[in-house]
Amino acid sequence: MTAAVKIASDVLQVSDLRVELAGQVDVLADVSFSLAAGEIVGLVGESGSGKTTLATALLRHARQGARITGGHIAVAGQAVLELEGEALRLARGGLVGYVAQDPATALNPALRIGALLRETVLAHLPKLPGDAVQQRIQETLVDVGLPDDAAFLRRFPHQLSGGQQQRVMLALAFVLRPRLIVLDEPTTALDVSTQAHVLDTLKRLCRGHGVAALYVTHDLAVVRDLVDRVMVMYAGRLVEVTGRERLFSAPAHPYTRALLAAIPDIARRQPLQAIAGHAPAPGQRPAGCAFAPRCARRRAECAVIEPSLSALDAGHQVACLVPHREVLPRGDVAVESVTAPGEGVLLEVQGLDVAYDRQVLFDVSLQVAPGECLALVGESGSGKTSLARAIAGLGENVQGQLRYGGEPLAFSARQRDARLRHQIQYVFQNPYRALNPCQTIAQTLSAPLAHFFGVRGDEAHRRVEAVLARVSLPARVAGLYPQSLSGGERQRVAIARALICEPRLLVCDEITSALDVSVQASILALLRGLQGEGLAVLFVTHDLGVVRAIADRVLVLRRGRVVEEGSVEQVLGWPVDDYTRTLVAHSPRLHLGG
Amino acid sequence: MTDARWLADPQVRRGAVITSWVVLVAVLGPWLAPHAPTAMVGPVYGPPTAGAPLGHDFLGHDLLSRLLSGGVSVLWMSVAAATLALLVGGSLGLLAGFSRRRLDQAISWAADVSLAFPDLILVLLIVSMLGRAPWLIVLTVAIAFTPGVIRLARGSAVAVAGQEFVEAAQMMGYSRWRILFNEILPNILTPLLVHFGNMLTWAVGMLSGLSFLGYGVAPPAADWGLMINENQAGLLVQPLAVLAPALLIAVFAYGTNILAEGIGRVSARIGEKQP
């Protein structure tokens, strides 16, 4: 009888869940946890850790090639894994709601918002009379903070902003009044202010309706203000489950600590520490603890015994043989600027206008000194990428003045002479498209050598090896094709391609936004090192934490205009402009205060 | 690197085996044939006998000898036409996809206009006006295929040209030719190769069709398409005379088709995951 009572109080109970690929390779194993009504739990892990696999398993779905092979999932008393056919269809959405990562692709572009909502309701409650359907839709729209008038219901998804689209996704999930809602990184595509508002709405909805929520994310900072508890996942296992406060103040698992140390924080400049090595791929798990090869605290027994999730104390579970028991030191290690920015001006932009079908940049001026890192900050659509491309010589319809080293600089890379082209290099946002898939890394890297310096043969070979070493990649990478490298490794190769040209100015366009936090930390550390060698960096980003970690000065762009400019301490610490203030206020932070 | 992966796929291997079997028959056939293809050695529409396992055709030629000698023309003409279309169409499409301005508009417009003509009618028109020399037939079939190749090459090139590694090459200041042939061409080769296989199939069909309509290879030369035309009157008396060449054409078309599709499927799997 007591067991039944326990189940009744928990909306979700998962025990010993196991998901396998072909050949009994587990992607997920020994996963057990429970969620109470109204509780929001964050599921945190890096790419490949199995967090999305776990999230979709709660809807009894496994991606192509994977199978749920064991365990038990109960949502509000219903055994989800035993559902079939019609019952399963009704459970998906009706019992367990799902909000996908990118609302732009998750909403059917051919259906109006009203039709989407009505279709969803009628698929689950076909007998509901029209008035009731309408009423429920309107209630839900008001709940998620959207207008409920007829004009809004007649709109198509592409006519909404990203934040509104994600609210529509929330409405689609909540309109069926599910007991559990699974959110797979629902705010990664959104700007910080929009993200903060959507998260507020989500929290209010879950509390108000008593819906349990599992919030999947790779970013611990995002869940700082949202969740009640956090589950940390590594290589398909839960390694730490604890309350929010406890996680941020006294994390017990070495991986959690490493993850926290890798996240840039807007509140203070801390040395970011990358986690050495790679997470094991499914099927390549080492014996014993999967994190042991990367762990500084490992002992001999770690390579033998696989620790299971066990209680450290009340409400705190950890899977580690030698967990940290002390509180996380609040070491305010202020990182000094690596170098005092050099004398003079390397790049000067004056009165730059860029217009495509509409004008995206208005009268932008900036200066970069040698050895300085200037961060360009703005939300999507602020024109920061257009500015970076114009400086790199990829822009179109550019007007204004560019000066480099005191001389005028042409707008098109083709019109610049070779000396300028190799001194100004650009690193692209998406490492998956930045390298030619048909060329080996050695070919990609030696092409600019032959092009700019006429260096071929042994000398080129030597320089390629040297530049790979500079970006901390092994020399054997030279013979590989991009498809056998991970995203972080590809981004390193892209940086190496820029470095081999011996640049003096490096333009980086959101180069870490597609990467995991631990990889991001290592790339940022690499850039800081290069900056110490006198390289000027123009770093485009939307993440103020990253700005704090790397930049000397900040330029804030809004709708194509510069709204604030100054040193990092000044702009992030005492923002003057209203827009900068909201940006700073809405940025997720790890440490309250500073 | 890619070749080994292609051959590892069972469908590619099956397609390659079937195709090369027909090619072998066509290429080695003339030497293996017991009689000259134009020698009249038996009764008109004679049934199969011990000396002539497939029987005789409408003039009393040995059917087996004609079959063995009649493949070369179909094969070389289809390969030549498809290759020509691939080279011309591929270059034009690549140029259009990368330049993206007036040149693109001009090339795409020309391709669209010629796509409006039905292929076979276009070929028939040219051949009936200018004669039936083999090179002219090859040329006209290639002309009929080129717009399709242009469309495909242009579409693929546009998708690749927008990728960052091409922009990086532009920023480095590499020459246009180098960007076209080193950066873009290798990345659109796979769809073009698959299309080449399909064109081979269509060319065989079109050439046989032309021969059947009387505009292809001139009699008395042996040709599979022509043989179907010549012997259709005796279909009920000596069905083999029509069915045997038709079967060979069908097998070749089937072989090239599944070969092309197999290559396409293997290449599609190469396409890496993007987050």
Image (tube, coloured by chain):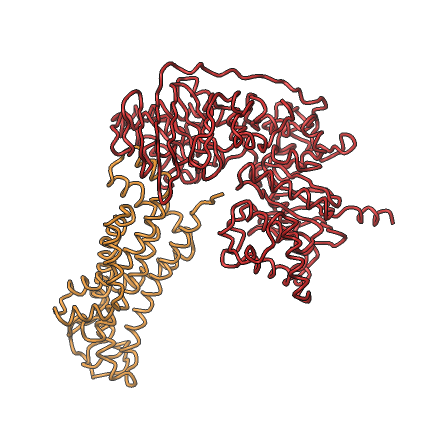
**Residue B218 at x, y percent in the picture:** 15, 72
Q: Is residue A226 above or below residue B94?
A: above
Q: Quadrant of residue B212?
A: bottom left
The answer to whether A97 appears left or right of A436 in the picture is right
- Residue B98 in sight: yes
The answer to whether A458 appears left or right of A118 in the picture is left
Q: Residue furthest bottom?
A: B237
**Residue A131 at x, y percent in the picture:** 67, 64
Seen at 33% across and 69% down, the residue is B250
Q: Quadrant of residue A357?
A: top left
Q: Quadrant of the C terminus of chain A?
A: top right
Q: Which chain is orange?
A: B
Nearer to me, A129 or A463: A129
Seen at 21% across and 79% down, the residue is B230
Nearer to me, A68 or A79: A79
Q: Name chain A's colour.
A: red
Q: Is residue A501 above or below residue B228?
A: above
- Residue B65 in sight: no
Q: Residue furthest right?
A: A1
**Residue B77 at x, y percent in the picture:** 21, 62
Seen at 53% across and 20% down, the residue is A569
**Residue A169 at x, y percent in the picture:** 59, 50
The total number of labels drawn is: 0
Q: Quadrant of residue B22?
A: bottom left
Nearer to me, A467 or A23: A467
Nearer to me, B191 or A90: A90
